[in-house]
Amino acid sequence: MRKNIISLFVLAICLLSTVGSIAKQKQMKLRVLYLGGQVDWTHGEFGSEDHYKTQEDYQKAQIERMNAFGDLLRTYFTTVKTMPASEWKPELSNGYDVTIFDGTPPVLKETAKEYVFNGKASTMKIKHYLPEDFACPSITIASIGNKIGQPYGCKNDWLCLCLDANAHGMNLQHPIFKGPFKTHLTLKKQPTPADAMHYGYFQDWNVPDSVMMWEVNTKGYMTTKGFNIGMVSRPWGYMDSPDCEAISSGVCAKTIDAVALGRHANFFTWGFVGSPLYMTNEAKVVFANVVAYMSKYRGTPLVRKYIDRIATREYIKEVKYCCTRKYVEERAISDKAFYEELLKIGKEARAKKAKGEQLTNQEKMYVDYTENDIPKPKNYAETMQENHPELYAQFGDDEAKYLAYYDENAPYFYGGQGSYNLFIDTDAKTWQIPNNDKRLIEKAISCLETNTEVERANRILERYTLCDFKTPAEWRK
């Protein structure tokens, strides 16, 4: 009996020793800086309701979230510092292997930017939060990625503030799902989000009716009123440079391949907004793996994208689709449902107002909304005339001619300046060489060498390169 007790005691000591060694192995020697400021619930930003009754409650929530991230990071890494993003200075990140931006840092400078929208030129002030040479490995949470990254030229932009709680389309072979900390992903087959089906015309393949889902957050704004909202980035143009990885999409109101998890050079976007208080245990491990993964990307060259709404070839698919009768019919149905919802909100808001009850921000916006505010539906011809006046003058209501126009000119469209503007490169079209074909550059240089079509050649070289060589020999070299 005594021998058995001793054996059990020795076994217990061994087990405790093993557990202790495993705990030590989990902690990686890494210095992590976390910058807080966001909260898990809405607080009046972007037209949302304010979940917090007082400013003190809101500040308390910021601290709770900061502490939750600190606890998670200290589980896996040896050195962790948490602080408000508002107190951050760029040089602080030099002393850490990874910086996590979960709040808005101080503005470093403001610049004026001219842009064109719907044919009208305007000027807006751009706030810059990062120095131009900021090369520290960084992770941005939800919309912070766009806020600090877009002025910097990062592709982790704001396609849509509409990301919910689940991921899909994961690249399960990516290192963040492999280690250094052991992961396990529970995947469940779920219906494809309705909006992803709607935007199916963007895909060169049929969007499936169901996808494998992975739960990242235990709550999401679609099922829990007042929970904060995550962000997805534009997938088109995301992978056209070697410094990018699109790792996962997620349930959102955009395309099936909108980027929820992705890396652009030294910036990683974690589009899901929930803190460790609302992360699944599986997501917590993956997040730790993201931190470890990003630590090797200090100083990675970044191909900058300053115009986040530049039109790429993918945008042609949307413009072409919007020239179909199917689109006009679908739009009429969705508009009807939208206006009916606004009428309902307005009616309920007026009833509450009559009773002296407090109205939400949304109810205040539509308290006076009635059927008189609903615009008259437009038929196909009216829609084309409004959206494509120049083409309408040529094609009228002939759907086939609109579609043929975009098909014929697809190899020669480029984005240029402005928001979602498409231009036809008449120079490339004259030569019948697509503007994403390197033969176009070869042709331009040959023209300079033979002194033929020099003006056209110079326009093409200026349009598609970042170079400004003076002689044909320099271009050839």
Image: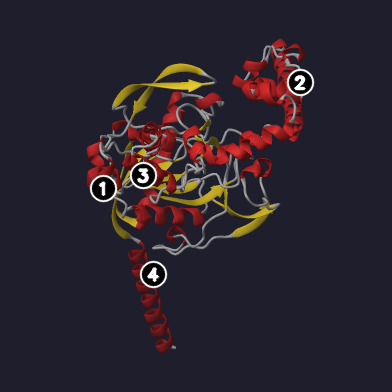
How many callouts does the rendering have? 4
Residue 374, by quadrant, is top right
Labelled disc at residue 19: 4
Q: Quadrant of the N terminus?
A: bottom left
Q: Is residue 74 left or right of residue 186?
A: left
Label 3: how many Cα within 10 Å (few below 14, some 14–19, many 20+): some
Label 4: how many Cα within 10 Å (few below 14, some 14–19, many 20+): few
Question: Considering the numbered disc 1 on the image, is that residue within a helix, a strand or a loop?
Answer: loop
Q: What is the spatial separation of the Cα atoms under label 2 and label 1, in whole angstroms?
A: 57 Å
Q: What x and y, as percent, mark residue 376?
A: 76, 17
For badge 4, the amino acid type reads Val
Q: Are marks 2 and 3 in contact (CB under 8 Å)?
A: no
Q: Is residue 273 left or right of residue 2?
A: right
In this figure, which residue is indicated by the disc labeled 2? 377
- Of 29 and 455, which appears nearest the observer? 455
Q: Say which label, 1 or 4, has the lower sequence index.
A: 4
Label 1: how many Cα within 10 Å (few below 14, some 14–19, many 20+): some
In this figure, which residue is indicated by the disc labeled 3? 446
Q: Say which label, 2 or 4, has the lower sequence index.
A: 4
In this figure, which residue is indicated by the disc labeled 1? 96
Q: What x and y, as percent, mark residue 466?
A: 33, 38
Question: Given this view, does label 1 or label 4 mark the residue nearer the observer?
Answer: 1
For badge 3, the amino acid type reads Ser
Q: Residue at x 50, y 57 (%)?
A: 282
Q: Residue at x 73, y 32 (%)?
A: 399
